[in-house]
Amino acid sequence: GEEDYYLELCDRPVHFEKANPVNCVFFDEANKQVFAVRSGGATGVVVKGPDDRNPISFRMEDKGEVKCIKFSLENKILAVQRTSKTVVLPEKRNLKLLKSQNINVNWYMYCPEGAVILLSTTVLGNVLQPFYFRAGTMSKLPKFEIELPAVPKSTKLNLSERDIAMATIYGQLYVLFLRHHSRTSNSTGAEVVLYHLPREGACKKMHILKLNRTGKFALNVVDNLVVVHHQDTETSVIFDIKLRGEFDGTVTFHHPVLPARSIQPYQIPVAGPAPVTSQSPVPCKLYSSSWIVFQPDIIISASQGYLWNLQVKLQPIVNLLPDKGRLMDFLLQRKECKMVILSVCSQMLSESDRATLPVIATVFDKLNHEYKKYLDAEQSYTTALEAGQSRSSPLLRRPVRTQAVIDQSDMYTHVLSVFTEKKDMPHKFVIAVLMEYIRSLNQFQITVQHYLHELVIKTLVQHNLFYMLHQFLQYHVLSDSKPLACLLLSLESFYPPAHQLSLDMLKRLSTANDEIVEVLLSKHQVLAALRFIRGVGGRDNISAKFLDAAKQTEDNMLFYTIFRFFKQRNQRLRGNPNFTPGEHCEEHVAFFKQVFGDQALMRPTTF
């Protein structure tokens, strides 16, 4: 069903007039534009790209069959080729020869992302000569030889441009060679050989993707994954060269990440006025022989008049990759991974799909490894700025926060807080999971946010596991922090020793008593704050703050208690129960009278 397809065609394809005897269709890989040329251009040329929602239309004289047609970047100059040796620029321009190379070329291929052109040379065609364009200059890179499957019988062209592609994968340029038969006799099936093409230094064979089948193939690259389409079975597979493969000392062998699946079935929307479109959409013929595939992620059906971008769907992959560690390695490299990763974390903690603690630990460690890399990069960036490096320095780049950075608030909000609320979870498992996450953060030396400690404490208190709480604090499993100390103070009524544990923590943090009172009141822990100043002896002029806090709780009995406490305190400290004007308690006295009457106010204060 729907949940099984991990590749799909984009839902807003570029639609153009389909190829027919009067309409010729061309594709320009650099600008990603489709040209539909009707009768040599005389009855119109329409140009559309994936990003331009408004197509360009124009006419030109029919001067014979158009072999190729392209715009320069930003659609400034149009070039038309009608014979094998002439290219016409419709605008009169002077061209200047910047550089020439004498090479016999069988075919060429250009990669716009890398600005590299690849020329096939020699009789067999398997010696490739790359050139790199930069800032108006052309530099020659070292040539390299593509190893053909077997010693060729004849001396005719053996390497077809159909079997070569160029693409950027994980920021590096690769030449992909589709070798239809393996060089070793014992292994069957075709393979894709990846040659890494650096800007400096020689091209090197790095990876071999094992297809384990033969037939007609086409290649795309999407989200740094190599996608191989197989026409005979009408399925595709994906490879991720970042995942661990088998290294034989020179190259790494990779197998498909997932079982082969078809691209998700696609319905062609029926165009036309609304009443007419009630007819059902037409299913699109996938893997059709009229499909043409371009790098990195483009599929064109000239016969149907569509250009699609191929996309990877991550959610279905979750159920197709049972090994959670490998699944995380895979997901962390994908562009739109955050919500999927968080859903995997929730799923592995769910009643029905519960993972073992070692697996959960592995997942947490993989996430925190990425998180720490980002925190370190942020830190070095800040340090460099503080050390006076200018923002414009080319070496100084603010680290980009990708979706693979999953921080504590993400985990808390989407996974852990929801998980601890579940009634049917065994509490030992809940606590073990929380402690596992904290252990992982500590292992990567990431400061644990106090709300995670609070979550642990609340969970322990809920299940009356005070002995465990005591141990965690005693052995500093939970790090000292002011919010944590205040939380402990508030637990005193359930667990009396919490008061002392809290004060010890605050003393270790050398917190001023006033600040402790402030924090407790801000957390509406009025009675805890009261007990605290009783214990440490307090300062004057604090009564108004307490009465404010008590009034805010809208608990009149609490207000009564606090009010009477401070009247007694005044009697004890000054021999007079009344508040001094400096204490600004007039409105509280008025409120007390209003609620409890004058009689209550006059009652003697006794100890």
Image (cartoon, helix red, strand yellow):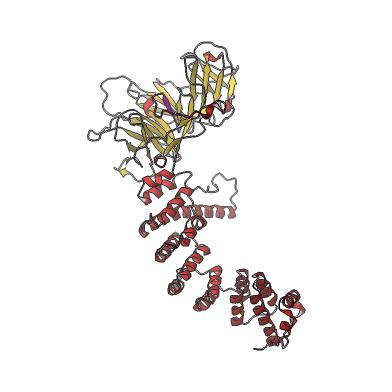
The x, y position of residue 352, in whole percent, is 38, 55
Q: Nearer the viewer, residue 355 or 405?
A: 355
Q: Nearer the viewer, residue 360 or 147?
A: 360
Q: Is residue 90 visible?
A: yes
Q: Is residue 559 left or right of residue 380?
A: right
How many numbered circles are shown? 0
Q: Quadrant of the C terminus?
A: bottom right
Q: Position of residue 543 (x, y in %)?
A: 69, 77
Which quarter of the picture shows residue 349? bottom left
Q: Is residue 87 above or below residue 231?
A: above
Q: Name the residue: 58% across, 73% down.
A: 511
- Percent of width and height locating residue 9: 46, 34
Residue range highlighted in magenta: 279-296
Q: Is residue 606 left or right of residue 259?
A: right
Camera-nearest residue between 328 and 372: 328
Residue plotted at (43% across, 47% down)? 331
Q: Position of residue 95 (x, y in %)?
A: 56, 19
Query: Principal SS element in the magenta part?
Result: loop
Q: Does residue 339 appear left or right of residue 515 in this picture?
A: left
Is any atom of residue 199 visible in this view? Answer: no
Question: Does 281 appear in magenta?
Answer: yes
Quadrant for residue 189, please give it.
top left
Asked if residue 336 lies in the magenta stretch, the reply is no
Residue farthest along the top direction in this orientation: 63
Q: In which quadrant will I find the N terminus? A: top left
Residue located farthest toward the left when viewing the structure as drawn: 186
Check the image and report above or below for 154 versus 465: above
Q: Nearer the viewer, residue 36 or 605?
A: 605
